[in-house]
Structures are given as C-alpha cells and as structure tokens.
Image: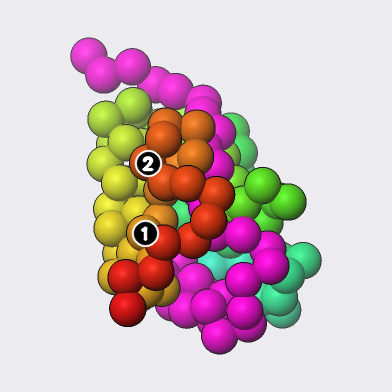
Amino acid sequence: MNKIVNDSRNLNIRYDLPEEIWDKVTQVYESMNGWLGFNDDKGDEESVPYWFSFNEDEKCISASVEPSGLNFIALNIAEDEWESWLNNFKKVATEKLGFIVGELELDEVDYEIEWIR
C-alpha cells in the first residue's frame, strides 16, 4: 500500500520574477491534473491556487508565493502520486517559463535562474 503523506516543497519560482513570467505560472497551474482554481475569484497575488480539493481534510495541493520561492503544500495524498505530480509541474513549468524549475533544497537548481531560452 502506498504511504499517504503531508509534505511541503519549495520551487525556485521567486516572487521577484517579472509579471510576464507570473502570467505564465497561472497557465502552468491550469494545465496541471486536479486543477480547481483559486480560493477566491481574483486570481491575484493574494489568491491561493488549489488542486483536487479546497478542503484540506481531503487530498489537496495548494501553493503560495514566499520570499524563498513558490511553496507547495500537499495534504492527504499518496506519496508516489505527489512525487509524480510535482515532477510533472517542474517539467511543464520549465518548458513554459523558459528556465529550469526545481528545488534548491535538493540541489536541482542554484539560486540564480538558469534560463534555457
């Protein structure tokens, strides 16, 4: 049986990136499996994106922009499903945003953005 996890991960999508990059981040959000929308109708920097459920007692992924980067919180999700979902997010975001998206803590990326185009 697959272990159910509650986890938090931080990606190098920083708050200080240009607005045109953040517009593309929203497109990445919308392309991901389980996309529900934002916790409000605004979809601005105060809004929280959710996947799978808005109820944090159920399987749920949410994200917030922190000084260290884009922080994902996954709750009540099978470990392999979470890893697969996050790896897919990194892949899609890298293609869409034009730089390598990854986790500093795992040494996937450095602090400086590595543009690929």
Farthest residue to the bottom: give it. 20
Q: What residue type is labelled 2?
A: Glu
**Which residues make up the magenta segment?**
1-29
The residue closer to the viewer here, 10 or 56, is 10
Quadrant of the frame with the N terminus: top left
Can you give x and y, in whole percent of width and height, for residue 113 in the image? Answer: 49, 61
Q: Which mark is residue 109?
A: none
Please tell me whether mark 2 sits on a helix, a strand or a loop.
loop
Quadrant of the frame with the C terminus: bottom left
Label count reads: 2
User: What's the CA distance linking mark 2 and mark 1?
Assistant: 9 Å
Can you give x and y, in whole percent of width and height, for residue 54 in the image? Answer: 59, 51
* Residue plotted at (73% across, 51% down): 67
Is residue 51 shown above or below 76? below
Q: Is residue 9 left or right of residue 78?
A: right
Q: In this view, does 116 lie to the left or right of 46?
A: left
Q: Which mark is residue 108?
A: 2
Q: What residue type is labelled 1?
A: Ile
- Asked whether the beta carbons under mark 2 and mark 1 sit within 8 Å of each other, the answer is yes
- Sooner in the amino-acid sequence: mark 2 or mark 1: 1
Q: Residue 100 carries which label?
A: 1
Please tell me whether mark 1 sits on a helix, a strand or a loop.
loop
The residue closer to the viewer here, 7 or 110, is 110
* Residue plotted at (55% across, 42% down): 10
Mark 1 is surrounded, within 10 Å at the Cα level, by few (under 14), some (14 to 19) or many (20 or more) other residues, namely many
Can you give x and y, in whole percent of width and height, for residue 13 in the image? Answer: 54, 59
Regarding residue 64, the answer to whether it shows in the image is: no
